[in-house]
Image (cartoon, helix red, strand yellow):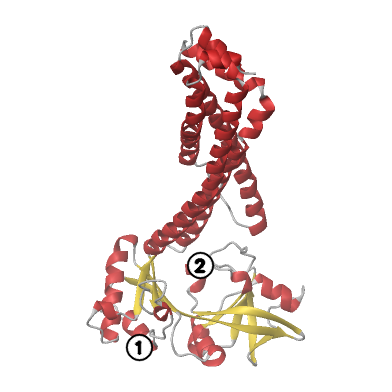
């Protein structure tokens, strides 16, 4: 039997029972579509997160209080008040950090803001005037606080768009006083909407001089983060090393394993986020692959039924000269065709759903959610589909090839 005739016979066998063939491949279609959807959305999420991280500047370094956790149970490493004013003074010295371009201490907390009878739960972000440059923030109304406000501990704030909507209900917030923990704070600026999908959701934040936040609002003498910018991308590694050595000297640390702080570059953060998103994607792909196994079992069952129903056909083909290998190849090819067709449909369906969801997420979250067609996932899907056809179609095909032509012709 020639390959052309073999292929034609297999297609004819599948076309004879179209409804059954369509129902048979549903498991494969769902499994491949789920894999394509997960991989595509995972790649889009990774591109969005990494884009926002890199948007902070590749020459940015973050100093985080507490040592880097050694494992899931090492929760004490996450809570620390190790970054103090003396550390900021030491880091500001060019003798200690020669490639320092700028430095910004930050304090972060939560509180309830109020205006008249309106109240809104907010995130309090204390920083210097450099926050506007580092995070590329441009008020839609008013202006940012400046260095003199930081030095004088002025009671001024820049509020997010949602804060303005909830507290002022369409009124002009500029020049008005809001209250946080009993202290009046004058609104000098309002930020435009940034979207809930941003790395930092400034819509629900109130920004103020870190000195004001420390002394009057949060009552803490330590920093939540210290953000540093080096003079260029080429000096990031040297700056990170200088920062580490300076803080060890400030904290009297001689053993690097005893560090009570973590120095993290944007590349470090990008690599860790990539690892996390990849791990989540692989996990979800593994879960979605269960549908492929279920689909493979379904194909085996249907093929066994088909072999039984076509017993007389098998006997007739053998009587006309077909050997065991021809029968095996025919039924095996039918199984592979079923799974490959299902895989192709799954790729089209999954990528189409991912494209539609990407548009919905872009509009709903107000971010640029990039649609990514996973070529590797598509190739993997087709390959896995073919393998499933070979594996799960092998047993029914072998059963068909072993049938005796005489008994097959007598089968009723």
Establish if 7 lies above or below 361: above
Q: Kindly report the distance in space between the C-alpha atoms of the residues bearing marks 1 and 2.
A: 25 Å
Q: Which quadrant holds the C terminus?
A: top right
- Dot 1: what SS? helix
> Reading the chain from its start, which is encountered first: label 1 or label 2?
1
Percent x, y for residue 321?
Answer: 48, 7
Q: Is residue 329 visible?
A: yes
Most foreground residue, 282 or 170: 282
Which residue appears at 33% of the width and 80% of the height?
A: 91
**Residue 401 image position (x, y, % from top left):** 48, 20
Bin the neighbour count of mark 1 within 10 Å (Cα to Cα): few under 14, some 14-19, many 20 and up.
Answer: few
Q: Nearer the viewer, residue 256 or 229?
A: 256
Name the residue at 50% across, 67% down. Answer: 135
Q: For this view, does 98 lie left or right of residue 157?
A: left
Identify the residue position indicated by label 1 in the image: 86
The local crowd at label 2, few if under 14, some if 14 to 19, many if 20 or more residues have their Cα within 10 Å, is few
**Residue 177 spot, x, y in % from top left:** 68, 86
Observer-nearest residue: 103 or 305? 305
- Please tell me the numbered disc located at residue 135: 2
């Amino acid at each position: 039997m020639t390959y052309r005739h073999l292929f034609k016979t297999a297609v004819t066998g599948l076309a004879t029972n179209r409804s059954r063939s369509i129902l048979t491949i549903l498991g494969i279609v769902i499994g491949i579509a789920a894999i394509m959807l997960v991989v595509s959305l995972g790649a889009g999420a990774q591109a969005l997160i990494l884009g926002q991280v890199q948007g902070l500047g590749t020459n940015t370094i973050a100093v985080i209080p507490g040592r880097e956790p050694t494992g899931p149970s090492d929760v004490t490493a996450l809570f620390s008040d190790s970054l103090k004013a003396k550390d900021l003074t030491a880091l500001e010295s060019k003798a200690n950090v020669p490639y320092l371009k700028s430095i910004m201490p930050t304090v972060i907390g939560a509180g309830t803001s109020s205006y008249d009878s309106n109240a809104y739960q907010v995130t309090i972000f204390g920083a210097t005037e450099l926050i506007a440059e580092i995070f590329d923030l441009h008020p839609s109304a008013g202006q940012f606080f400046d260095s003199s406000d930081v030095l004088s501990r002025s009671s001024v704030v820049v509020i997010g768009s949602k804060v303005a909507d909830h507290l002022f209900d369409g009124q002009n917030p500029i020049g008005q006083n809001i209250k946080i923990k009993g202290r009046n704070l004058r609104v000098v600026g309002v930020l435009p909407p940034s979207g809930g999908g941003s790395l930092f959701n400034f819509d629900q934040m109130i920004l103020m001089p870190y000195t004001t936040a420390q002394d009057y609002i949060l009552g803490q003498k330590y920093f939540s983060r210290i953000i540093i910018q080096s003079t260029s991308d080429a000096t990031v590694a040297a700056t990170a090393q200088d920062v580490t050595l300076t803080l060890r000297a400030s904290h009297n640390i001689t053993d690097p394993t005893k560090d009570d702080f973590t120095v993290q570059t944007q590349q470090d953060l990008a690599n860790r986020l990539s690892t996390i998103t990849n791990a989540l994607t692989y996990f979800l792909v593994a879960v979605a692959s269960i549908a492929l196994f279920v689909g493979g079992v379904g194909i085996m069952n249907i093929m066994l039924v088909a072999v039984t129903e076509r017993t007389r056909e098998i006997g007739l083909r053998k009587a006309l000269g077909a050997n065991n290998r021809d029968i095996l190849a025919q039924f095996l090819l039918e199984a592979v065709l079923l799974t490959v067709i299902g895989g192709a449909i799954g790729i089209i369906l999954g990528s189409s759903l991912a494209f539609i969801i990407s548009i919905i997420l872009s509009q709903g979250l107000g971010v640029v959610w990039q649609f990514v067609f996973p070529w590797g996932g598509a190739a993997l899907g087709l390959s896995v589909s073919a393998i499933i056809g070979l594996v799960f179609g092998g047993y029914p095909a072998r059963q068909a090839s072993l049938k005796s032509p005489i008994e097959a012709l007598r089968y009723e």
